[in-house]
Image (cartoon, rainbow, N blue to C red):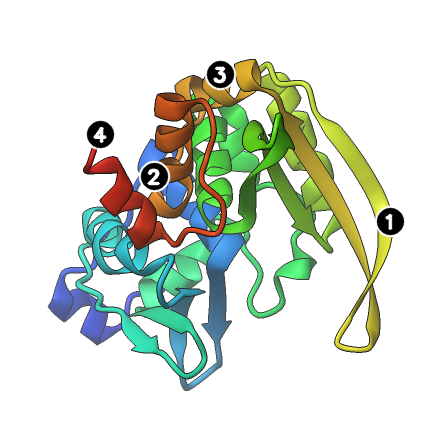
Amino acid sequence: MDVLFSNFDRGCGVTLPKLNDELLAYETGVHIGDGSLQIVAGATHSVRYFGHSDDDWIFYSEIVPKMLKQLFNKEVYPTKRNDAKTCTLSLCSKAVATFKRDVLCLPNGNKNQLSGLPEFVKTDEKLLASCIRGIADTDFSVFFFRKGGVCAHPAISCTMSNKPLILDIEAALKQLGFSTSVRYDVLRKRNGREHTEHIVTVCGKDQFRAWMETIGFSNPKQKTKFDIWDELGFCLPKQSTDDRIAFISSF
């Protein structure tokens, strides 16, 4: 299917990457984690990304805009809502939106329509690892179990309501050489309502180091936790991204 370029796209010089681009695979992971595609006929064609106004600010004010410029030749600028603790990045382009929908097969609207990871990232392990890194930067949690009174035993975990997507993420992690722990159909109450969630987790020191070699993190929110743990053998609890960056600068 042909991608649709608006006159505005042509005037701005919007470009589209090839499917074998590892940066595109990474951006697709970021989209799966924090993105939203909105296409309304005769109206908006946009991709929006949402993060935490503090912990994700460096990621969405520095790293993601540079990536989008490189991929699509579009300048984007984040906005912050401190009252809602969110930051937003919006990319308005008919070409990019229809490329994501018709070529990458990302759903318009609710991402629970995703039937798994996009097929193009499954064609090569480098693309697969890049996509997983994008999802991990936005939708995974990095935490540490207490051992000997300190937060020393690392775990990397993803919780989603989309079961086919979790199944694909689990399969991808196994393909990349990781052992996983998986829980399906977990019932949880949130805001007075029951939700069914599915959880995949990678645990242990050796796997944490292997993750950084094979997949890695680009979001400082995640990467700084590894950097402190790697230096000290444990991670300090209840610190913000800015706290961890300041602490690392003292090494």
* Residue 185: mark: 1
**x and y percentages locating residue 64 in the rendered image:** 29, 53
* Residue that label 3 marks: 210
Comes first in the chain, label 2 or label 3? 3
Q: Where is residue 40 in the image (x, y as percent from the top left)?
A: 48, 80
Residue at (35%, 38%) from the top-left corner? 224
Tag on residue 218?
Answer: 2
Outermost front residue: 149
Please tell me which residue lies in front, 25 or 50: 50
Q: Which of marks 1 and 4 is nearer the N terminus?
A: 1
Mark pair 2, 3: CA separation: 15 Å
Q: What residue type is labelled 3?
A: Ala
Query: Does dot 3 land on a helix, a strand or a loop?
Result: helix
**For the residues bearing labels 4 and 2, Cβ distance under 8 angstroms:** no
Whether label 3 touches label 4, CB < 8 Å: no
Mark 4, residue position:
251
Instruction: Quote the CA–CA distance across marks 3 and 4.
Output: 23 Å
Nearest to viewer (mark 1 / mark 3): 3
Q: Count neighbours of disc 2 (C-alpha within 10 A) and say few if under 14, some if 14 to 19, many if 20 or more.
A: some
Tell me which numbered mark, 1 or 3, is placed earlier along the sequence: 1
Percent position of residue 119, x then y: 57, 37
Task: Look at discs 4 and 2 and give the one toward the viewer.
Answer: 4
